[in-house]
Amino acid sequence: MSLGKYRSFITGILLFLLLFVPFFVFGNAVELRPPIEVEGVGEFLDRIFSFFRSIALFAAPVFFIIGGFYFLTAAGDPGKFQTAKNIFLWTAIGVVVIVLADLFIDVVIGFLS
């Protein structure tokens, strides 16, 4: 009898047991706490936006460097030159959108307060 037919079912049962048996075994000893402490939905959304803004503003110089690399290695190839221009353009647009989104959120919060 081949287990290939039932492999996903057996894997699902084992994963369920691995994840949920400790809750039943230890009972009240396992305490689930929220990963971040926030006062409300507004602060939660602000933290999420801050996280993504930090990642985007970290990635922007990296993309500018990649675009510069394409520009320097184009050597007359119009395809690479166009790729470099597109990377510069879309990275700049992304940075402007992120800065304007932050400004827009501050204006909306100020208007609603």
Image (cartoon, rainbow, N blue to C red):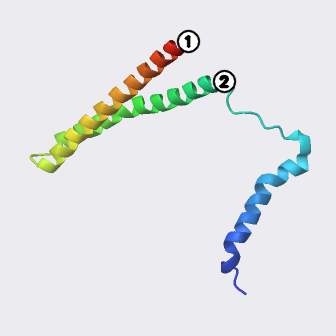
Dividing the image into 4 quarters, which one contains the N terminus?
bottom right
Q: Kindly identify which residue carries mark 1.
A: 113
Residue 100, placed above or below residue 20: above
Left or right: 48 in relation to 83: right
- In the figure, residue 32 lies in which quadrant? top right
Q: Where is residue 106 in the image (x, y as percent from the top left)?
A: 47, 17
Q: Where is residue 105 in the image (x, y as percent from the top left)?
A: 47, 21
- In the figure, residue 101 lies in which quadrant? top left
Of the two numbered discs 2 and 1 on the same chain, state the one appearing first in sequence.
2
User: Which-is-in-front pick, marks 2 and 1?
Assistant: 1
Mark 1: give few (<14), some (14-19) or many (20+) Cα within 10 Å: few
Which residue occupies 17% across, 44% down? 82
Q: Nearer the viewer, residue 30 or 69?
A: 30
Give the label on residue 101, or none. Answer: none
| Residue projecting furthest to the bottom | 1
- In the figure, residue 68 lies in which quadrant? top left
Q: Kindly identify which residue carries mark 2.
A: 40
Which element type, helix, strand or loop, lies under badge 2?
loop
Which element type, helix, strand or loop, lies under badge 1?
loop
Q: Which of 89 and 18 is in front in this view?
A: 89
- Name the residue type under label 2: Gly
Which residue occupies 24% across, 35% down? 89
Q: Where is residue 22 in the image (x, y as percent from the top left)?
A: 84, 50
Mark 2: give few (<14), some (14-19) or many (20+) Cα within 10 Å: few
Residue 74, placed above or below residue 63: below
The residues tagged by marks 2 and 1 sit, at their Cα atoms, a distance apart of 15 Å
